[in-house]
Amino acid sequence: MGPHARRDGVKIFLIAGEASGDRLGAALMAGLKTLTEVEFLGVGGPMMQAEGMQSLFAMEELSVMGLVEVLPKYFHLKRRIRETAEAALAAEPDVIISIDSPDFCLRVAKIVKENSDIRTVHYVAPSVWAWRPGRAEKMARVIDHVLALLPFEPPYMEAAGMACDFVGHPVVSEPRANAAEMAAFRDAHDLRDAPILLVLPGSRGGEVSRLGPIFGAALEKIMQQRSDLRLVVPTTAAREAQVLKLVEAWPGQPVVVAPEGEVAPDATRKRAAFAAADFALAASGTVSLELAAARTPMVIAYDVNRISREIIKRMLKIDTLTLVNLVSETRAVPEFNGELCKPDLIAQGVLEMMQNPDAQLEAMQVTMERLGEGGEDPGLRAAKAVLARIG
């Protein structure tokens, strides 16, 4: 029986390679289940498994970052690519949906396309508007349909020859801390009614070790002028030991907020910290959207090593790394990237932002509206987009 013989429901093969993809996949699966009878197969993490999928193997095997880490695992990953593609072909699903993790997912899609006409969907567009525009053309050889998280991405994907739907960003559907949770957070950490500066030096080890000392030196200068501030540093279980060591040298006895127990990441405490904070100093990344969702004014600072910096500078097509600035089409969030990532410049930027925090509020509001806040849940929008194009 071919993939189009079943009309009573759909069979969907999903592939996710890391925690953020597992979260997107689970929301998509929940959306699909409200719309149709559906059978799920593929690779996913605990959240997707909770929605009713048995994973072919542990998703964690695919979460390798960087060349040095990948090389020893190269042959193992190659085997997993082949195995995943063979399982997808054998299942004859109506559609294969791969989620982020392009290094793994697009290699699977390539084998599938060489051996079948099964429809392929990729969830999360490559950021071709920022750098390496050629990735979209390459992707179009093996992907039929893209689900985009950012509203300005569809034209780039369509120009490369793929169908594309903007389905909203998952940040808009994440729950917000309420007043009671914020008050409990302040009490638990003895913050009383002091103004809180959230400090977020990155989520990867390399980022924390590079940005941590720069942020620390900036905080010395900030605290000289704002001794009333309390510093709060949310982190992950994986980074907790590194961050605790780092903040020993920082002024003002920072409060480190790490997940309790095995919940990854313990969302309630992190949400409360983001919502209770008055200001933030953060590394570049999705965190700017989480801060915008909490309406916490921010300064963004980021740097890489000198060689990478030169390469990236030549490759970058945009003048901002901050999604709030890109989505709102403003430059409301101050940034100190590359050679501007210096303690004295960052300190000055943070102090100026504290004097006029409302300057960013409109840009944050516009960003969240454009990402789908107040609208349909992104997982449901993604599910509808997939089903509409299977037809």
Image (tube, rainbow, N blue to C red):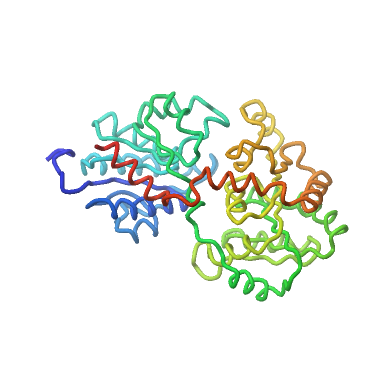
Task: List the single residue furthest toward the left.
Answer: 1
Res 77 quadrant in image? top left
Residue drawn 80% across and 65% down?
252
On the picture, is 137 further left or further right than 344? Answer: left
Res 103 quadrant in image? top left
- Residue 310's place in the image compared with 343, above or below, is above
The quadrant in which the N terminus is found is top left
Residue drawn 39% across and 53% down?
27
Closer to the camera in the image, 336 or 303? 336
Residue 237 at what x, y percent from top left? Answer: 57, 62
Residue 174 at what x, y percent from top left? Answer: 49, 57
Residue drawn 63% across and 64% down?
273
Res 87 quadrant in image? top left
Task: List the single residue furthest toward the right.
Answer: 224
The quadrant in which the C terminus is found is top left
Closer to the camera in the image, 337 or 111? 337
Tally the numbered discs.
Answer: 0
Residue 115 at what x, y percent from top left? Answer: 25, 31
Residue 175 at what x, y percent from top left? Answer: 50, 61
- Residue 151's place in the image compared with 192, above or below, is above
Closer to the camera in the image, 289 or 2? 289
